[in-house]
Amino acid sequence: MDCKFTFEIGNLHTAALVSIDGSIESYCVPDFDSPSVFARILDKDKGGHFSIAPTVAFSTKQNYLPSSNILQTKFLNEKGVISVTGKYNIPVRSTRSNCKERFLSDFLPRQARGTIASNKPLLHWMIRRVEVIRGNMPILMQCAPAFNYARSSHTTTIEEDSSSFISQQQKAVFVSDALTLDLRYVTDSLLDNVHAPEVKFQFLDLSAKGHKGPAVSAEMTLHEGQVVTFVLRSPPTQEVEQEADPVAAGNQTMKSRPANDPYLTKFKLYPAAAHHFLKSTNKYWNDWIRNSHYSGSWKEAVHRSALALKLLIYEPTGAVVASPTFSLPEYIGGTRNWDYRASWIRDSSFTLYALVRLGFTHEANAYMEFIFERLRNKNPDGSIQIMYTIHGKKELEEIELTHLDGHKGSKPVRIGNGAADHLQLDIYGELMDCIYLGQKFGRPLAYDDWQVSDCYCYQLVDHVVANWRQPDLSIWEVRNKKRQFTVGLRIADKRSLPCPKRNEWLATRDEIYEEIMAKSWNKENQHFGQSYEDVDVLDSAVLIMPLVFFMQASDPRFTHTLKQILKTPERGGLTSNASTLTFHCFSCLLILNLVFRYDVHKSDDGVGGEEGTFGLCTLWCVEALTRAGKYDRSMLQKAVSMFEDFLLYLNHVGLCTEEISDAGEGHVTLISAAYNLSRTLGYA
């Protein structure tokens, strides 16, 4: 399974990855950073999966519903081809009568604002809806959880489902020491002369592959018009207020059920119902993206990126997770396999910048609340961490899961992140940028939040003024030695609120500026270096200099650096050019116009192994070229060319991958690059 072809669904608490053949390959319950129950993407035998697929030869097509995060997979057999319109379940069929097609819709439900259901509790359900549009098709469903990163054993029972009105309908219950899941289903027929299908669960023994408890499976042949909807959930442990079910209301023998454990009926799941989950979830995403203010070029890619970023927000705290994945390799067979299910100050600030640019200020306000809580709990020396858990905790112990094989054998598999206590001084600048943008476009920053309250925002600047000369471990979180890396804090008047030490801050800003220009500049090769100690090593992080207003993109020092980065590695640069590489989930892919972070053969970062190009760095380069292009039109043409090339590396539903690019960072920089490029070209 190639993780380039995995797609994300989520509910702002957690997310799941769906493969191109309709299998849930990664899923952590109930939160982003909870232990996994499905992780076959990291171990094909014992990682755990939830698959639904035909048992005959088939091809697949996938798409998100328009302006939505509901994923739709279509399975077609080899006897025909069917074209499907963007509207749900309204296909444009071919004239051949022997075509067969099955729909599989995957989503985690959300309630649209302003609906009757919007004040009800969020149901932590995974809903998988199967419908045959034409012909008939045999399918196999397998639900094989592997609790606690495949470390915990579980028991499985198949019993009667009390939440169903149909007598003797089954459900499967999986019980581990810390988590219980149950798998239920609802059947229906959309045609008058076709009966609802029958589903029968059976135990499935996968112990030979390393599973620590029984799975369940169901084989069935579905005919045109028949629908089966599977619902996987963690049953509620506490009941909330009772719900008047529309079906139970007409049946005196039926008792009402808690709102977080309702009857499972087609009235809740199917389009015929006024408030069924699919309709409400789709409305939630449609309503959200409709608030976008973006009117520039590449609007489809920008909005798909915004929807992908929204999935990274942990709604209970406002934190922004860097990615819903853990331990996917940067390079197949390599060791750079990190857990990104935490909230980085830097990444979150970039994410909020992108969303604010599109007009989504609610997310900015929520993240500001998360940040202020962290500032009220600074470290004893006045510093903050580079990352926190999505719950705001500081401890992210890094553990290697030696029992898992890794994606395509890429070991080790890691959870937690040992870089949490790294010193990276640039985060203070990004955080102040974030606070500035948040108060400018969202809720204005109160005086008490700035200077009087427990968080003391201005004390962050004082901390950096006192400590900026310390070597750190850089934006890239190197794991060997601290150095004086070039990318650091810019304390500028534009980003400062009134403060008694204003003059001291500005003096420190000037001192930092002069020192970088003196000690990071390679006079011989005419470019900025990675650090004071390694001025001969190029680093694409310096591309953000004009983005954070450190210097003008037209400055000869910057343009010389930019032109050097645009050269191929063979010529001393960092930009790939028609080379064939195999890296993070891509095999034998022709790479053109994409940028590396730095040359791992010239810069020892203490990790080892190879790595591919970074979409983040490529899009930084696009922005740098855009800003330089205001003064040199040839650079603007290069920016357009590089951006258009980058869009070719998105997968077929418009998502970025890790290298070509981290789930969050790639979409953040895509939005920013498109916004500034469109504005410079005069399209926005």
Image (tube, grey):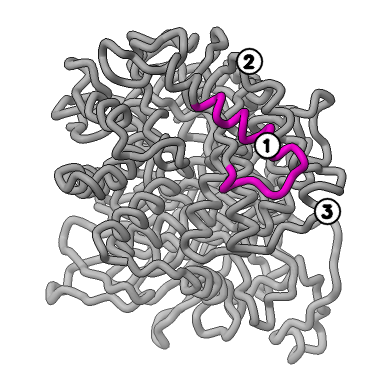
Give the quadrant of the N terminus: top left
Instruction: Give the image location of residue 269, x and y in percent.
Output: 57, 73
Q: Residue at x 67, y 66 (%)?
A: 168
Based on the picture, tell me whether residue 372 belongs to the magenta stretch. Answer: no
**Label 2 belongs to which residue?**
470
User: Mark 1 sits on what residue?
Assistant: 503
Expressed as whole percent of the image width and height from the top left, the position of residue 477 reads 54, 21
> Which mark sits nearer the N-terminus, 2 or 1?
2
Name the N-terminal-most of marks 3 and 2. Answer: 3
Q: Which residues are magenta?
A: 493-513
Residue occupying the point 48% across, 44% down: 664
Q: Which residue is mark 3?
A: 448
On the image, the x and y values in percent for residue 429 come to: 59, 37
Is residue 499 found inside the magenta-colored segment of the image? yes
Q: Disc 2 to disc 1, how far (Cα)?
A: 22 Å
Query: Which quarter of the picture shows residue 536?
Result: top left
| Three-letter residue code for mark 2 | Gln
Work out how far the residue at label 3 is from the one at label 2, CA to CA, in angstroms. Answer: 30 Å
Tag nearer the camera, 1 or 3 = 1
Identify which residue, 206 or 412, lies in the foreground: 412
Magenta stretch secondary structure, dominant: helix
Q: Indicate which disc, 1 or 3, sits on the residue closer to the N terminus.
A: 3
| Residue depth check, mark 2 versus mark 1: number of the one nearer the observer | 1
Q: Nearer the viewer, residue 266 or 406?
A: 406
Q: Is residue 506 above or below residue 421?
A: below
Looking at the image, residue 597 lies above or below residue 458: above
Position of 505 relative to 675 (above/below): above
Image quadrant assignment for residue 554: top left
Residue 209 seen in render: no
